[in-house]
Amino acid sequence: MEESKKFLYSAVQPTNNLTIGNYIGAIRNWTMLQNDYNCYFAIANMHAITVRQTPAVLRQRTLSLLALYLACGVDPEKCTLYLQSHVPAHAELCWVLNTFTYVGEMERMTQFKDKSARHAENINMGLMDYPVLMAADILLYQADVVPVGLDQRQHVEIARDIAQRFNNAYSPTFKVPEALYMKVGAKINDLQDPAKKMSKSGENPNGSVFLSDDRDTIIRKFRRAVTDSDLEIRYDPETKPGVSNLLSIYSVFSGKTVEEAAAEFSGKGYGDFKAAVGEVVADRLAPIQAQQQKLLADKPYLDGVLKKGADGAAYAANKTLSKVYKKIGFYQL
């Protein structure tokens, strides 16, 4: 770790297939951020079990996500890449931070309300406590910044509140993290309902493009994407959300600005436009998918990456946890 660089924390759950929204909003950014920050990147399997998981599937998706990170260019020599459950300090700090968190705060969290509505048969305490575990994730590594989409702002805000509450009670212990909003593609919307964020668990499978989709499926989904009756291709999220969403996606996968993308398709029809977006996405994902499958065939290598990452993460996390235990009065050997 380079002391001159700021510290950054981010994590993704190994649940369902990841979408191009996850790629644009998180993983793609990680490959750039790892050069500028001291990065801790986690596979958040402890968060995943707030919703019932099939154990064998969860294990398989964990390795699949790790291989995907690596295939996308996340470099374990440049960052600390690890599995959340391999570092017990996450759960230990979460318990302490629970005593600095109020029930009303958790009940007001948007994600708790949304998930409670979708999983009414399993409204468990882990679902409510999710943001406190996320705060523990962030604060353990003294993160300066947390890259998030606009819809995740609440989680950084509650982490800041908890950190300040603890610091005020016991003297400065945690860095108070800042949200890092990525300018391009911060929010990729559903292809069938552009008013909604593209989701791993969206109701309409045609609304989400998954990183595991084959070429024909990707192109078909984009051909079916919702646009509007005004045939002009321009970036205007308010009045043309579908077209603007497609321009954002094309911009990221082509490396062009949104303005350049709009100019490229000026005067062309929606059919050609949507097909071109599908083609550029499929072209970009093909080598990632091939490399992911190659890595999945080498389990010893993947296990080695996780072991190295767990050792590095535990070293940093335990330093923070030891300070916390000392300040709250836990007797330590």
Image: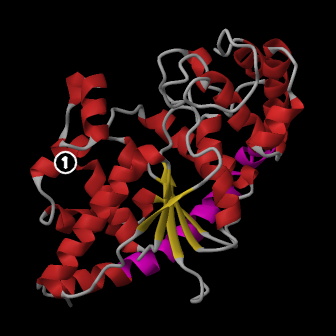
Residue 153, how many percent across, how many down?
39, 52
Q: Is residue 58 magenta?
A: no
**Residue type beneath disc 1:** Met
Residue at x 23% of width, y 67% of height: 162
> Does 315 appear in magenta?
yes
Up the image or down, 275 lies above or below 81; here it is above
Q: Secondary structure at mark 1?
A: helix
Q: Is residue 242 shown left or right of residue 140?
A: right
Where does residue 75 sit, x and y in percent of width and height? 71, 65
Residue 265, position as x, y percentages in the image: 86, 27
Residue 191 showing in the rendered view? yes
The range drawn in magenta is 290-318
Q: How many marks?
A: 1
Residue at image x 50%, y 31%? 197
Determine if residue 92 is in view. no
Residue at left offset 44%, top offset 58%: 84
Provide the residue designation for mark 1: 106
Q: Which residue is painted at 26% across and 86% down in the image?
A: 172
Looking at the image, residue 162 lies above or below residue 263: below
Please give left or right for residue 141 compared with residue 275 in the image: left
Q: Residues within 10 Å of mark 1 (few under 14, many from 20)?
A: some
Dominant secondary structure, magenta: helix
Closer to the camera, 315 or 245? 245
Work out which quarter of the rendered image holds the N terminus and state it. Answer: bottom right
Foreground residue among 228 and 163: 228
- Position above or below: 306 against 229: below
The location of residue 152, given as percent across then percent down, is 41, 48
Q: Is residue 58 left or right of residue 100?
A: right
Residue 201 position (above or below residue 253): above
Which image quadrant for residue 136?
bottom left
Q: Residue furthest top?
A: 229
Image quarter of the C terminus: bottom left
